[in-house]
Image: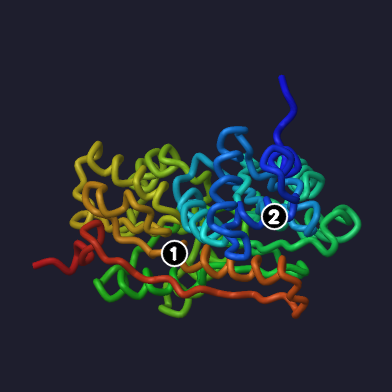
Amino acid sequence: MGRRPTLKTIAEEVGVTVSAVSLALRDDPRISVATRERIQRSAATLGYVYNRHAAGLRRGDSGTVAVCLNDLSNPFFTEFLGHMEARFREAGRMMLFGHANESLDVQAQFIRQMVEHGAAGLILIPVAGTRRDDIAGERARHLENFPVVLISRDVEQTPYDRVINDDALGVQLLFDHLYGLGHRRFVWLGGGKETSTARDRERAFIEAMRAAGLSVDDETIHHGPTSLAFGDTMLERLLGTGEPPTAVLCFSDVIAFGVLAACYRHGLRPGVDLSVTGFDDMGAAAYSSPALTSVRVRTDRIGQRASELLGARMAGDRRPPERVVMPPELVVRDSSGPAPVTRR
């Protein structure tokens, strides 16, 4: 296999300087049209390909951006990728993607590898259980002075920009919607305690319940994985309680889809016999049966703002880190309706 052709190779073949070749390949008008055409023909014949890696080394910027996704199995998180990839592509940057699979070890390995390979910056959706010490301080010295932006999940007291959803507002919008429909027997499903989104959403639900004068006990909140199976199996348990709920608020759309499936198996009409709501408003929410009432997390705006912040940091911005909270939107569909006791 021969050596990869370089600017010098083209210059020697055409009989011009290396700088003239460089200018001609960028269509610089300082090189005559005839000479530009000769140089460009030679480059095509020789199979010349621009060496971005070498150029990146010369200017100290690889032109690549790393994105570490926490969970590829959840379609919600993949929605961020499309928005961010488009932004970076427009800026002439290539996005390198890693899947941490909710593993702290895999996340740490990917981040270190991206720094070692010269990525210009990192956007991180932290895996469940990520703490400050995992991505800053003594255990993460390699990230000092390295541009990092966190999205979706917050990690408090980190020296990085964070762009997250206003989860408390989203839950309040859902609760007010259902309370206004006459619901008083609520249940919260899923989330756990290992992410900021889970903690903030559950806390907001408890606060909304108490503000409305409703009690919160062991039958009101149920933790579980963000999965269809959890939502599906939980409904049978809920129906076996003394006073089954009239409204189920789910931590995510994925859990809500499982509840909807279980409703039909138990002869219940979602939105009529039992109101079911999700959170995130994934693309599939509008096409479930019935269409799912959910909170739309603006993945487009979060991805856009995160890309802007990272771009600024890579360009040398040294201002104090920002914590940007994006307001969500309530999307009412057919899976929620008046409480059964209020029907005529």
Describe residue 181's horizontal placement relative to residue 279 as left or right.
left
Q: Which residue is drawn at 19% across and 41% down?
A: 267
Q: How many labels does the image show?
A: 2
Could you say which disc has been placed on residue 66 in the image?
none
Query: Which amino acid, mark 1?
Result: Val
Where is the N terminus found, in terms of image quarters?
top right
Q: Is residue 249 visible?
A: yes
Residue carrying label 1? 297
Residue 31, compared with residue 128, is above or below; it is below
- Whole-percent x and y of residue 59? 78, 59
Which of 298/234 is in front? 298
Does 243 sit above or below residue 114? below
Which quarter of the rendered picture does the C terminus lie within? Answer: bottom left
Tell me, for residue 20, which label it has, or none.
2
Q: Which residue is drawn at 55% across and 41% down?
A: 41
Query: Gap between marks 1 and 2, in whole Å?
Result: 51 Å
In the displayed structure, 334 sits above or below 1; it is: below
Callout 2: 10 Å neighbours few (<14), some, many (20+)?
some
Q: What element does badge 2 sit on?
A: helix
* SS assignment at label 1: loop
Given the current orientation, which residue lies at the most extreme left position?
344
Q: Which of marks 1 and 2 is in front?
A: 2
Label 2 sits on what residue type?
Ala
| Residue 162 position by quadrant | bottom right
Q: How crowded is mark 1: few (under 14 residues within 10 Å), some or many (20 or more)?
A: many
User: Which one is earlier in the sequence, the residue at label 1 or at label 2?
Assistant: 2
Q: Position of residue 176 (x, y in %)?
A: 35, 75
User: Is residue 114 found left or right of 229 in the rendered image?
Assistant: right
Instruction: Tell me if residue 104 can be seen.
Output: no
Q: Residue at the spot x=67%, y=76% of the render?
A: 322
